[in-house]
Image (cartoon, rainbow, N blue to C red):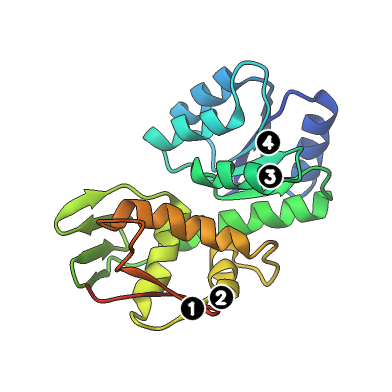
């Protein structure tokens, strides 16, 4: 099945360059230049991935991503013109699956797109196994999580992170291992993005995110999932 990608950017030259590169790789691509159009397209559910610019004329890409996440698990790859940690953090906190900082190479962008789509297919192909770790329950097939019986809504990246940790409770996973799992690639970029994903996950599954008891930090190494 050919993946359908939506490119949302208000710079015509960049928008068409990205579309051209993706079409050359066999993707079906549509382009938009506004946040309102992006939200409407996301609601229609016709796309497999959205490439979203951080800065748009009618609404920020971050706010678009937040609104998309309220109703959809559509993967979002954020584009930012600013090489700053703040932009990356804000984008990931809004629910973006990955980010690319301008200027970027088209091969890098295509590689990131393929990695996200591979993760999506792996998620769809996962069997209907249910994992229970203490008061935490993961339904891998239905992409559902419950904490003490209460349903919790996670983004795709947060769910994949939790599923990785739940696969081997108490084992310590390094930041590199986690990011390689999330991106399905040996190229992991900035390992600090791992801390952002963990922080986002803790806000949703911990009773007190400032004093986490489930997703535990092992200083100087990485993270593990405790049986609580």
Q: Which residue is mark 3?
A: 27
Give the Cα distance between marks 4 and 2: 32 Å
How many numbered marks, from 0 up?
Answer: 4
Give the Cα distance between marks 1 and 4: 36 Å
The answer to whether residue 209 is above or below residue 225 is above
Asked if the residue at tag 3 contacts the one at tag 4, i.e. Cβ–Cβ closer than 8 Å, the answer is: yes
Give the Cα distance between marks 3 and 1: 34 Å
The answer to which of marks 3 and 1 sits earlier in the sequence is 3
Task: Report the mark closest to the observer, 2 or 3.
Answer: 2
- At 67% from the left and 49% from the top, the residue drawn is 85
The answer to which of marks 2 and 3 sits earlier in the sequence is 3
- At 30% from the left and 76% from the top, the residue drawn is 226
SS class, disc 1: strand
The answer to whether residue 79 is above or below residue 192 is above
Q: Which residue is mark 2?
A: 177
Give the Cα distance between marks 2 and 1: 6 Å
Q: Position of residue 19 (x, y in %)?
A: 76, 36
Residue 29's disc is: 4
Q: Quadrant of the C terminus?
A: bottom left
SS class, disc 3: loop
The answer to which of marks 4 and 2 sits earlier in the sequence is 4
SS class, disc 4: strand
Task: Report the mark closest to the observer, 4 or 2.
Answer: 2
Q: Which residue is mark 1?
A: 173
Asked if the residue at tag 1 contacts the one at tag 3, i.e. Cβ–Cβ closer than 8 Å, the answer is: no
The answer to whether residue 160 is visible is: yes
Q: Residue furthest front?
A: 210
Relative placement, left or right, of 218 versus 78 is left
Identify which residue, 14 or 81, lies in the foreground: 81
Identify which residue, 112 or 66, lies in the foreground: 66
Residue 102's disc is: none
Q: Position of residue 58 (x, y in %)?
A: 62, 16
């Amino acid at each position: 099945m050919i993946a359908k990608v939506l490119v949302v950017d208000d710079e015509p030259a960049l928008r068409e360059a990205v579309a051209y590169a993706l079409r050359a790789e066999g993707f079906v691509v549509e382009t938009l230049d506004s946040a309102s159009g992006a939200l409407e397209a996301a609601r229609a559910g016709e796309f497999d991935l959205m490439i979203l610019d951080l800065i748009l004329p009618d609404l920020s890409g971050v706010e678009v991503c937040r609104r998309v996440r309220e109703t959809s698990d559509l993967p979002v790859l954020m584009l930012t013109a600013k090489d700053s940690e703040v932009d990356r953090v804000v984008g990931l906190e809004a629910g973006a699956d990955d980010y690319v900082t301008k200027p970027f190479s088209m091969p890098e962008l295509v590689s990131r797109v393929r990695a996200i789509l591979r993760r999506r297919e792996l998620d769809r192909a996962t069997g209907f196994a249910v994992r229970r770790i203490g008061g935490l329950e993961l339904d891998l097939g239905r992409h559902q999580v419950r904490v003490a019986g209460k349903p919790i809504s996670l983004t795709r990246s947060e769910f994949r992170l939790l599923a990785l940790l739940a696969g081997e409770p108490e084992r310590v996973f390094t930041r590199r291992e986690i990011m390689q799992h999330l991106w399905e690639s040996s190229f992991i970029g900035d390992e600090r993005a791992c801390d952002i994903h963990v922080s986002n996950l803790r806000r949703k599954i911990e009773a007190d995110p400032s004093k986490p008891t489930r997703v535990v930090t092992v200083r100087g190494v990485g993270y593990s999932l405790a049986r609580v």
